[in-house]
Image (cartoon, rainbow, N blue to C red):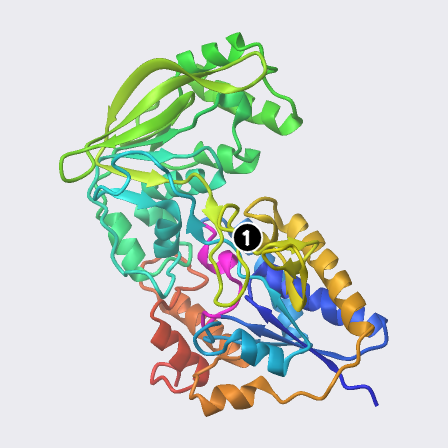
Amino acid sequence: MTAPLKVAIIGAGPAGIYAGNILTTSARAAGRDVGVDLIEALPAPYGLIRYGVAPDHPRIKGIVNSLHEMLDSGTIRLLGNVTFGVDVTLDDLETHYDAVIFATGATRDVALDIPGVDLPGSFGAADFVSWFDGHPDVARNWPLDATDIAVIGNGNVALDVARMLAKHAEDLLPTDIPATVFRGLAGSPVTDVHIFGRRGPAQIKFTPIELRELGDIPDVDIVVYDEDFAQDSESGVPAAGSNQLKVMTRTLRGWLDAGPRVASRRLHLHFFHAPVEIVGDGRVEAVRFERTELTAEGVVRGTGEFVDYPVQAVYRAVGYFGSPLPGVPFDDARGVIPNIEGRVTDGSGDILPGLYTTGWIKRGPVGLIGHTKSDASETVAHLLADLLAAESINRTDIVDLLRSRAVEFTTWQGWIELDAHERALGDADQSGVPRTRVKVVPREEQVSISLGTSVLAG
C-alpha cells in the first residue's frame, strides 16, 4: 500500500493556507492521500491578514472567513508557535516530510538609503503596522509625540499608516485594536500628516477604495496642491492609463476643487517629491526633498529644486522585503527564495528536490489575493508532479519531535479558543461602542488561552 504523502508548509498566512487547500484538493483528485501541516511561528493563523492589514479595513479582513473554512475542514493541520530554525530545522522537516513549501511572506521594510534615516523619530512602516495590529513580538508602546509627520511612499501601506496616524482614536474603537494601541493613539498630539511620492497624481500606486476612504475620516481634512497637478498635465505623459487611475485622479481633483474644510487634523498629499535626507540634531527635525518631474517617456528625474518640511517623525513606507530562513537559499537583492515556478533553486540555479515556495517570498511583495492563489496553484502543480512520480515512505509524526523538545505548539482548536476569548473581550468592552473582538497581544497569553491553561480561559 502506498504511504500517504506528507507536506509541511512554513507559514499560515493566506499563501500557506491557499497552498494547503489546493494541495489537498489536487492530491485527492489524483487519487492520493496527503497530510499537510501548516507550521506557523505565531500562536495564531492568518499572517498579514491578522498582523499586516489596518484594523479599520473589515472588507479585507473578511478574507479570514474563507481561510477559516479551509482550516476548519480538518484536511490541514495547524501547528502554531513553532519557529522554523529554532524549534525545528530544515533537516528535521526533510526527515518527517516528503516536501516542504515555504510561504513566509515579506514583512521587513525595504531600506531607504538616505542620510539621517537612523535618527530617532524615523520609523519603518512595517514595525508601526505590527504595533497597531497587536503583533506579539513588538513593543507594547509606540512614541506618538509628533504634531507634524511625514509618510514616504505612494502605495496602500503608506495610506494605511497615514490614515491610522491622522484618525482620531475613538473612531477606531469599533475595530479590534488592543487597549494599548487605543491609549497610544488617543494621546497623540498630531495635527498634520504629509504623504510624499516621487511621481505625480497620475502614477500613484494606491487603489481607488483606499484612496476614497481618506475623504471619509471624521474631522480630518484632505489637502492637495495645485502645483502637483500642473506638473502632471505638462509632463506629456497620459494623465491616466486605466479606469482605476481615472477614478483616483478624479478623486484627487475633487479634493483640490473643494478647498479646505474646518478640521482639527489635516492629511496632505504631496507628489513629485523625492526624499534626499532626513534632517535633525539628535532626532528628526525635517525631511529634505528634491522636486521631481516626468520626462516625455515617463521617467522621473530631479529638477535641482530642494525643499525642507519641518516634521518631528518620519515613516518609511517604500515597500516590503523578505527575510532569509536558516539553511534555505535566499536572493539578497530581491528578498525572495530563488525558484523556478515555485521549485527552490540553489546558488547555481539547480532545483533542490523536495523544497518549494509560494506567495511573496516566492515572487516578491506584489499582487493581491488573486495572485496568491495562482502562485499556489503553480507551485502545487510542480510539487505533485514531482512527488507522484516518486516512491513515498512512512514517516514519523513531527508532533512527537515537538513534544520531545517541550515546544508549546498551538492547534486549530487552540485558535478556536483564542478567537472565542477575543470575541468575549469585545462583548465585555465598556467603551459603549459595539466591538466584535479585542485582540490579545502577549504571546504567552495567546499560548496559554489556546492550550486551555490560562485562568482567563476558564
**Foreground of the two, 209 or 151:** 151
Specify whether residue 43 is painted magenta: yes
- Residue situated in front as seen by the camera: 158 or 274: 274
**Is residue 219 located in the magenta-colored stretch of the structure?**
no
- Could you tell me if residue 168 is visible in this image? no
Quarter of the figure with the N terminus: bottom right
Q: Where is residue 130 in the image (x, y as percent from the top left)?
A: 38, 55
Residue range in magenta is 41-54
Q: What element carries label 1?
A: loop
Q: Which residue is drawn at 55% across and 66% down?
A: 11
**In the picture shown, does residue 426 fall above or below 112?**
below
- The vertical placement of 312 against 306, above or below, is below
- How many marks do you count on the picture? 1
- Give residue 230's position: percent from left, percent from top: 46, 10
Which quadrant of the view contains residue 284? top left
Judging by the rendered image, the residue that carries numbered circle 1 is 336
Answer with the quarter of the image where residue 177 lies: bottom left
Image quarter of the C terminus:
bottom left
Task: Give how far across and how far down residue 339 sits, in percent.
Answer: 64, 55
Q: Is residue 90 visible to the viewer in this orientation of the structure? A: yes
Left or right position of 276 against 208: left
Left or right, residue 146 beside residue 330: left
Q: Which amino acid does label 1 sit on?
A: Val
Which secondary structure class fits the magenta region best? loop
Give the residue drawn at x 30%, y 45%. Answer: 123
